[in-house]
Image (tube, grey):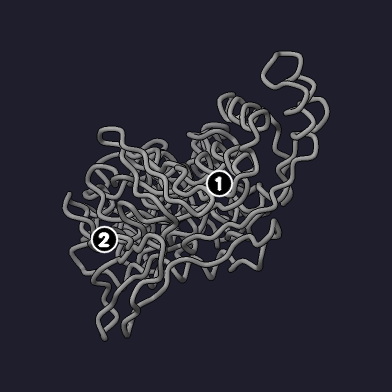
Amino acid sequence: MSTHRPALLTDHYELTMVSAALKDGTADRRCVFEVFSRRLPSGRRYGVVAGTARLIELIRDFRFDPTEVDFLLRTGVVDEAAAAWLTDYRFTGDIDGYAEGELFFPGSPILTVSGGFAECVVLETVALSVLNHDCAVAAAAARMVTAARGRALIEMGSRRAHEEAAVAAARAAYLAGFRFTSNLAAGERYGIPTAGTAAHAFTLLHDDERAAFASQVATLGKDTTLLVDTYDISQGIRNAIAVAGPELRAVRIDSGDLAVIAQQSRELLDSLGATETKIIVSGDLDEYSIAALAAEPVDMYGAGTAVVTGSGAPTAGLVYKLVEVEGRPVVKRSEHKATIGGRKVAVRRHKPTGTATEEIIVPQGVPDRKPNDRMLQRSYVVGGEPVSLPSLDESREHLRECLISIPWEGLKLSAGDPAVPVTVVPSD
């Protein structure tokens, strides 16, 4: 999907730097910017790279149209020279980074943008906007997938997010292992399987619950899900089976003490002969409430608010920093915000069994490769042209393999050290 990016997506301060750099002659100095996180959100043991393919698509189409350039001139954001530069803007540099679905840790250089200073710095806001959102959602979703222990999850948080963020969140959740989304735009745009059922409003519309269920079954058949908690859950289940028969695919419960209700509902369904009818639960679920239901007869979880808002960590805390100018490492020395200069290369070190043991980051060089090491960066854009990208399903599988590779302690929901320690090797 091609999306035009308006000039206003760029922050004012970025265009201030562009204007000044054009005037003093530094705009074309070859620079390297890196995207990384100084620390993981509280309680997290890993981050998940997500949104890179979306970002590359946006950068490919990143343009300033005449009306936007005129606005910037009229409001004094840029001068004539900068306006002319923006009119002809095309990114011509290189972008490398971790694969989508890769895990990252504090200091991991998950994206590297190389090119002229001006053409790179103008991308800071769009890069961080996409990656901070998608990485946050993917990390929360991955924790929920782990907590679900193989049971399916459906993402259903569109009503708790900005309309475009909802589509991006559905993509990030699917990347992390969710089975379905209720967001049809995400289904159309990214090929994600969609699923959903009627809401309480549909039951309330009809004279009684049975009439609502009969209408839904008559339209969609027995391979549907009936929402049974509008009035009384036990009676709702009886009505659902009376209308659809024991071949009903699933019932959904959206309220109450889900642990107790799931047990009671399973017993009731079995007593009615509906032994194959699945139980779907929803209602402000996060990774902790999902984990608490691990022993209960739940077949699928529906997660909404928590997943689309990062489950307490709505941003991945990523920053976009200049680390090299004309081949010379540059560093920021601000207290608690210092950076490590120079372009970096990273590898993930593994035992022969496949368990990840360490991430090695080398500034200004190539790490000494050992058996079972895996290079983490790949090319995304070369000379301004995007290269072939993995499919969403391939990235989804990559994340699944990465989660299998980390020590089991790294999958715990409790606070602790990063799942894989990071070592930065000093440059010579």
Residue 51 appears left or right of 49: right
Q: Position of residue 288 (x, y in %)?
A: 24, 48
Residue at 71% x, 33% y is: 6
Relative to 410, 183 lies left or right: right
Q: Residue furthest right?
A: 66
Label 1, secondary structure: give it: helix
Is 267 in front, or is 406? 406
**Residue positioned 62% across, 27% down in the render:** 20
- CA neighbours of label 2 inside 10 A, class few (<14), some (14 to 19), many (20+): many
Quadrant of res 195: bottom right
Distance from the alpha carbon under mark 2 to that under mark 1: 29 Å
Image position, residue 41 (x, y; %): 29, 43
Q: Which numbered tag is attached to residue 63?
A: none
Q: Which residue is mark 2?
A: 422
Could you tell whether 25 is left or right of 417 in the image? Answer: right
Q: Quadrant of the C terminus?
A: bottom left
Amino acid marked by disc 2:
Val
Q: Residues within 10 Å of mark 1 (few under 14, many from 20)?
A: many
Callout 1 amino acid: Ala
**For mark 1, what is the residue?**
168
Identified at 37% across, 52% down, the residue is 139
Question: Would residue 174 be visible to someone looking at this image?
Answer: yes
Q: Residue 227: percent from the left, percent from the top? A: 46, 46
Q: Position of residue 231 (x, y in %)?
A: 39, 36
The residue nearer to you, when weighing 407 against 194, is 407
2 vs 1, front mark? 2
Q: Nearer the viewer, residue 4 or 394?
A: 4
- The answer to which of marks 2 and 1 sits earlier in the sequence is 1
> Which residue occupies the extreme top position in the image?
75
Looking at the image, which residue is at 42% across and 41% down? 319
Q: Secondary structure at mark 2?
A: strand
Q: Is residue 243 something that shows in the picture?
A: no
